[in-house]
Amino acid sequence: MSNYHPLTEAQAIAYARQIPQLFQPGSELSSQEIGDGNLNLVFRITEAGTGKSIIIKQALPYAKVVGESWPLTLDRARIESEALMIEEALCPDLVPHVYAYDADLALTVMEDLSDHVIMRRGLIERNQYPLFAEHIGRFLAHTLFFTSDLGKNQQEKKLQQGRFINPELCKITEDLIFDDPYRNSDNNNIEAHIRDAAEALWNDSELHLEVAILRNKFLTQSQALLHGDLHTGSIFIKPDSTKVIDPEFAYYGPMGFDIGAVLANLLLNYASQEGWSQDEESRSAYRAYLIQTVKDVWTHFEANFRALWNERGVDRVFATPGYQDYFVANLLRDTVGFTGAKMVRRVVGLAHVADIDKIEDAAARERAQRLALRIGTIAIRTNRQVNSIDELIALATQAV
Ligand code: ADP
Ligand code: MG
Ligand code: MG
Ligand code: MG
């Protein structure tokens, strides 16, 4: 990594110019740093005349959100580019194409998706995306199945797993999701008006046991190559297209963690409707859409996953009658538990979500925060007893 230096906009243009077959020789290129994330630089390079454009995403050697006091490995750029390429091979329509990866500069050159919007923003604007559940259900089924022992040669899987040991980024998850929210940690970010609810989390030993069980699964269950950060800020969307970006947290972990990330972010927006819906009628209509999407994501995932298992399974022992049902039942329970954990951390932990934080009216924001905590904690508490996606939906709708 000796040649590493963060690019300026001018250097990003010079870099883009020397990539073969992207732009016309001598054409006029402009660059803009558009990163709104917490960890990286994102340059958009546009060619005058043709309007052709690409994205250069470069890792910084520290977390931008905290500053240089929090160093972070540049190897995450390799993990991100390799994960994107694996995902592209499995679901070519659902991720940006990668043109190039540069290990020295810790950067990935990829397809520009600026004609899409970040889904978190789309949901805050209360848009509906009828194809989303089918798309993300298929993404989850294919990426999780074909990187697991169910769909991949087990020796090859172990070798691939070795390329995705991601200790520094996993540590962020282990601390920020499974530890800090449940104790009085300096890393938490708690609004004064919900201090009582945060303290209740710290004193809830029944909840702590469930979180310890979930955390152990995150630490030890190498089921499949996860995206690892599959919130609605990592999804670009428009009515006819869904694209998953930003897999720098990718590692071999429990499948339910990725599915739970999607469901949690739908339910965080559900909770945030306290602040975004003007009237009761439009609120319940949008909530009904979100709840239906939660159900459809799981249903599409399960149907795709079972079909892959039946048609593309590589392991005779996993075809033992009853094993698939056992596996899927446990996967749903994990999914519900991780859904809850991902909701709680977004209310009291370090990194929040705009769906809730951007609500200006403090009373409405507080109602949204309390509702998200209620849904999240019930999901965590009951995860090991859940038998159907309808039970998650019932607990979410009854928590209102
Ligand atoms: P981080 O890891 O820092 O969160 P992201 O990969 O999420 O970085 O990208 C941050 C932002 O940069 C996105 O929210 C989006 O606005 C923009 N961005 C990232 N990738 C692309 C892309 N392929 N096309 C267009 N914009 C992108
Ligand atoms: Mg991101
Ligand atoms: Mg972002
Ligand atoms: Mg990221």
Image: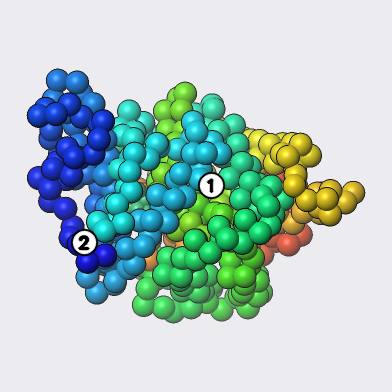
Coordinates of residue 190 in the picture (x, y in percent): 38, 67
Residue located at (29% from left, 71% from top): 71
Coordinates of residue 86 in the picture (x, y in percent): 50, 45
**Res 331 quadrant in image:** bottom right
**Label 2 beta carbon within 8 A of ligand 1:** no
Residue located at (29% from left, 52% from top): 102
- Mark 1 element type: helix
Mark with earlier residue (1, 2): 2
- Mark 2 element type: loop
Q: Which residue is mark 2?
A: 4
Q: Nearer the viewer, mark 1 or mark 2?
A: 2
Coordinates of residue 57 in the picture (x, y in percent): 28, 48
In the displayed image of the protein, which residue is found farthest to the front? Answer: 20
Q: Which mark is residue 262?
A: 1
Front residue of this view, candidates 319 and 132 = 319
- Categorize mark 2 by other alpha carbons within 10 Å: few (<14), some (14-19), many (20+): some
